[in-house]
Amino acid sequence: MSPAAVIPVPLRWVDLDAQGHVNNAVIADYLQEARVRFLLGGDNAALLGHGTLVVGHQVEYLAPVEFRNEPVEVRLWVGEVGASRFTIGYEVVQGGVVAARARTLLCIFDFDAGRPRRMTAEERGWFLAQASPLQTLRPLGRWRPGESAHCAPLTVRWTDLDAYGHVNNVRFFDFVAEARVQMSSSADPAGNRMSAAAQAGYLWMVVRQDVDYLAQLDHRLEPYQTRVAVADMGRTSMTLVAEVIDPLAGTVHARATTVLVCGDRTGRPVPVPDELRHGMELWPAVPA
């Protein structure tokens, strides 16, 4: 099925991480850029100003994205269209290679009323005219951090906010990554991404990441908290779950599931080191 749009998204040098590839969280930023350009270029451009909220992301990472002067190509499809929600599917392509595949569930939201609103017949008709079936991504299972989860403080920066005055959905990928690195460093100092290649000879590759958004996150001086736990441990991989919470009110703002593969310096999968495996047993997840 031909995409509804093919949108070039330029790369920036600062998009790269310590491994020299575009960071996994930045891929979500590319999806957002393509989605916004797609909406602004059509009859439903006004929806961005009235309130279009991201309900959830599913991102499957298939190949690294390298820095080049040429933009990556984001192929975009409209999937299922409901009364107030719609799904966008994507492929991020570099040099003819599909580097990521993703799905985003969005909701039309009335900020004044504080609730989702139904699309008008014209709004829904525009999406339906471009809709096509999307292949379902593999489910990751359902867990949540338990009582012994690793806790990392989270300070929201002013620059984390978007045009709606709330923390942008892409920033949650950063929050989860920061907590994940802190946890792995606590279990094994060599597990830190920044030192893995030079000291331990291994690194972590994110192959899948799902984020569900439950409540808007505001800027404030008091820190929030990201709780991380281990849901599953394989021979060369592990699945982590995280929650971004308000420790003062007990509100859960987002939940994330991340699948990582342990690799050598060339990116070939290798067994998870015993010291890290044992350390991660300190923070088990529980079924949701």
Image (cartoon, helix red, strand yellow):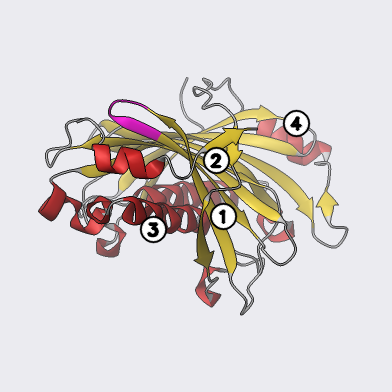
Task: Please tell me whether mark 1 or mark 4 is closer to you in this view.
Answer: 1
Instruction: Give me the C-alpha separation between circle 4 and circle 3.
Output: 39 Å
N-term-proximal mark, 4 vs 3: 4
Q: Residues within 10 Å of mark 4 (few under 14, many from 20)?
A: some
SS of the residue under disc 4: loop
Q: Nearer the viewer, mark 4 or mark 2?
A: 2
| Foreground: disc 2 or disc 3 | 3
Residue 97: which quarter of the image?
A: top left
The secondary structure type at the circle numbered 2 is strand
Which residue is denoted by mark 3 in the rendering? 182
* Contact between labelled residues 2 and 1, with CB atoms less than 8 Å apart: yes
Q: Earlier in the sequence, mark 2 or mark 3?
A: 2
For the point 66% across and 46% down, which residue is it? Answer: 43
Residue 57's label in the rendered image is 2
**Span colored in magenta:** 234-238
- Mark before the other along the chain sequence, 1 or 3: 1
